[in-house]
Amino acid sequence: MSIEAIEQAIPHRPPMRLIDEICEQSETTIVCKKSFSADEFFVQGHFPGQPIVPGVIQCECCLQAGAVLLHQQMDSAPGSVPVATRMDSVKFKRMIRPGDTVEIHVTLNDQLSNAYYLTGKMLLDGKMAMRLDFAVSVSAPEPPATGEETQR
């Protein structure tokens, strides 16, 4: 799947779009790739001289892959986006550094109303680098506040 198709599925844009390509996708699973570079804003000070990709960014990669996976199911509610509501059992097994390319695997485990329960895994060189269970709720974002509303 091209960058354009990814950006049609999710609202994220550089520098916060953290998926480079979709390798495989079914109704309940998705496999994505992300190559991290030394130019990424989040490694500039994390840590100087020994940069590593922050854990929160690794989690966000899985959340974005999950959002692409759920995009098909949200077609009936235009403008809706999946918003993270929970992250559980987050485990970091290997450090991810600039220059690394990871595979992101996300599986949809269950759905209850507008809540979706998923598992994400990030593989580095075919070995588990991190995993998490997470939940998202699909909802329409509120319109941005206008200047008048914020001045009241």
Image (spheres, rainbow, N blue to C red):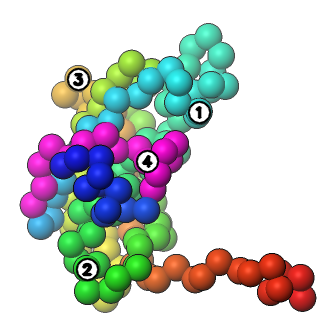
Q: Which residues are magenta?
A: 12-26
* Labels 4 & 1 near each other (Cβ < 8 A): no
Task: Classify residue 110 by image quadrant.
Answer: bottom left
- Callout 4: 10 Å neighbours few (<14), some, many (20+)? some
- Answer left or right for 102 relative to 11: left
Task: Classify residue 91 by image quadrant.
Answer: top left
* Labels 2 & 4 near each other (Cβ < 8 A): no
Q: Magenta-highlighted stretch: main secondary structure?
A: loop
User: Residue 17 got which mark?
Assistant: 4
Q: Position of residue 63 (x, y in %)?
A: 39, 56
Mark 1 lies on residue: 41
- The kind of residue on which mark 2 rests is Asp
Q: Earlier in the sequence, mark 4 or mark 1?
A: 4
Q: Position of residue 13 (x, y in %)?
A: 46, 51
Q: Camera-side residue: 137 or 13?
A: 13
Compared with 59, 117 (above or below) is: below
Q: In the rendered structure, does residue 16 fall within the stretch colored magenta?
A: yes
**Local secondary structure at mark 2:** loop
* Labels 1 & 2 near each other (Cβ < 8 A): no
Rendered residue at 23%/47% (across/down):
2
Task: Give the distance between the C-alpha atoms of the residues marked 1 and 2, in whole angstroms.
Answer: 32 Å
Q: Earlier in the sequence, mark 3 or mark 4?
A: 4
User: Residue 134 got which mark?
Assistant: none
Task: Give the distance between the C-alpha atoms of the residues marked 1 and 3, in whole angstroms.
Answer: 24 Å
Mark 2 lies on residue: 75
- Callout 2: 10 Å neighbours few (<14), some, many (20+)? few
Compared with 83, 106 (above or below) is: above
- The kind of residue on which mark 1 rests is Phe
Q: Position of residue 117 (x, y in %)?
A: 31, 70
Mark 3 lies on residue: 125
- Please tell me whether mark 1 or mark 3 is closer to you in this view: 1
